[in-house]
Image: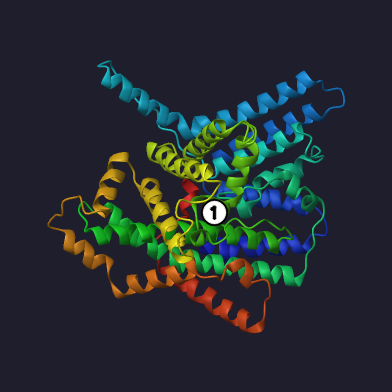
Amino acid sequence: MVFTSHIFVFYFLPMVLGAYYLLPRGRNALLLAASYVFYAWWDPAFVLLMFAATVINYLGAKVMAAPEASSARRRAAVTVSVAASLGLLGFFKYFVFVQENLNGMLAALGAPTFGVWRIVLPVGISFYTFQSLSYTVDVYRRVCPPVRSFVDFACFVSLFPQLIAGPILRYNAIAPQLHERTHTLEKFAAGTGLFILGFARKILLANPMGQIADAAFAADHLLPLDAWFGVIAYAFQIYFDFAAYSDMAVGLGRMLGFEFDKNFDAPYRAESITDFWRRWHISLSSFLRDYLYIPLGGNRRGRRRTYVNLAVVMLLGGLWHGANWTFVLWGAWHGGLLIIERAGNKQSLYRRLPHAVRVGVTFVLVLFGWVLFRSETVGEAAHYLTTMFGRAETGPGTMLVSARLYTPANVSMMMLCAILAFGPLQAFEYVRRVTWPRIALLIVLFAVSLMVMSAQAFNPFLYFQF
């Protein structure tokens, strides 16, 4: 089930909210049941996988928190929990990738290859695995006490607003809200407004940008300007798509009394790559910092070790996004840029340029990474990059692609996306104060988005695949 569907908007959400506010107690149990229905809508079988990850980490934390647990027993419990969780993630996400690369090596050596087993990737497995793992590790570190109720923990892992594509929650941050949370009209109104703004950005901005990007990346031949136009469209698509989902998740959380942290902070206004990663997918960046970068030694073991740690974290961060060498190279690209900036005390090489130029240069560097991120293969990425710099040959259909890209509607929508992406106004700040004029605007925006949604083909959120 997706947020931008009539089933969710007209049936699931009203029923859940109605039952939630009518119940005097047992609301976490209701949310748990609703979340499992939400997830099972896609494939009921994979509910068992999420349940298994929940049980593994719940029991691991119970063992670690037992009064008689020795240091060795605690280490064994956290090792088993982490290994089992990452084992599930690794099998479903990377098993096919490993098989295909082994086949490639065997073929290169002239050895016989084998048939590849195709594994279906469960939606959201990367998010709920990291989320449940953070709890186990935090209990081991004694950052937070173990949860008393299995229902509360299962609710935390499966909470439907952020189940499929984040933001990644930390148990120690959300635990007090599982026990007690406030419900006010102002909070509900702000959550509704944030949900509508996310809904509109997905339907009215991300999806049209996706059509432009798909046309550009699917073309065999492009003019350089067309290639730049296509990757900029993809940059806007992935931003408005993912930021929209995060805003909708935060908005739904507020409607249910929860308060989740902001996951995006105007990332395309960043002045450096270091600044970009402070603003983009903040919950993942902080997770990798706290559970990978710092345990590896962070910046406490000298410059060379710091650079190695940054490279490892970004490579694994790229691989987390998908089992493809393009994602590994995307992580390597950002890791290399971060290392260069770290060598300059976290400042970019172009820090002396005017602010607008710094933002523009950073955006261009991010665009090169998005080419890797969007391409199916390394060869396709290389071809697209060479096209951007006028090094690729044009073909007979080149002008047809240009005509398809530069329609008045596409150009107008691109300009609107640029204004919103680089402008100071953000959805989080806009709904801090809900006035009647803003309510009227949100109602109109929601009505238009619903009408457009009914005419669009099915287009799930991009991060569902990760």
Instruction: Tell me the kind of residue under disc 1.
Output: Asp
Quarter residue 416 falls in: bottom left
Q: What element carries label 1?
A: helix
Is residue 3 visible to the viewer in this orientation of the structure?
A: no
Find the residue positioned furthest to the bottom.
437
- Horizontal relation, residue 292 to residue 115: left or right: right
Find the residue positioned furthest to the top.
111
The mark tally for this picture is 1
- Horizontal relation, residue 420 to residue 218: left or right: right
- Residue 282, percent across and down? 59, 51
Residue 302 in the image: above or below residue 399:
above
| Residue 161 or residue 111, whichever sits in front | 111
Q: Name the residue under label 1.
A: 275
Colour treatment of the image? rainbow
- Residue 310, percent across and down? 53, 37
Q: Which residue is drawn at 39% across and 72% down?
A: 415
Residue 294 in the image: above or below residue 383:
above
Q: Which residue is drawn at 17% across and 59% down?
A: 398
Find the residue positioned furthest to the left.
396
Find the residue positioned furthest to the front.
352
- Horizontal relation, residue 433 to residue 341: left or right: right
Characterize the local packing of mark 1: few (<14), some (14-19) or many (20 or more) Cα atoms within 10 angstroms.
Answer: some
- Residue 72, percent across and down? 76, 18
Is residue 375 visible to the viewer in this orientation of the structure?
A: yes
- Residue 188, percent across and down? 71, 68
- Horizontal relation, residue 222 to residue 358: left or right: left
| Residue 340 or residue 148, whichever sits in front | 340
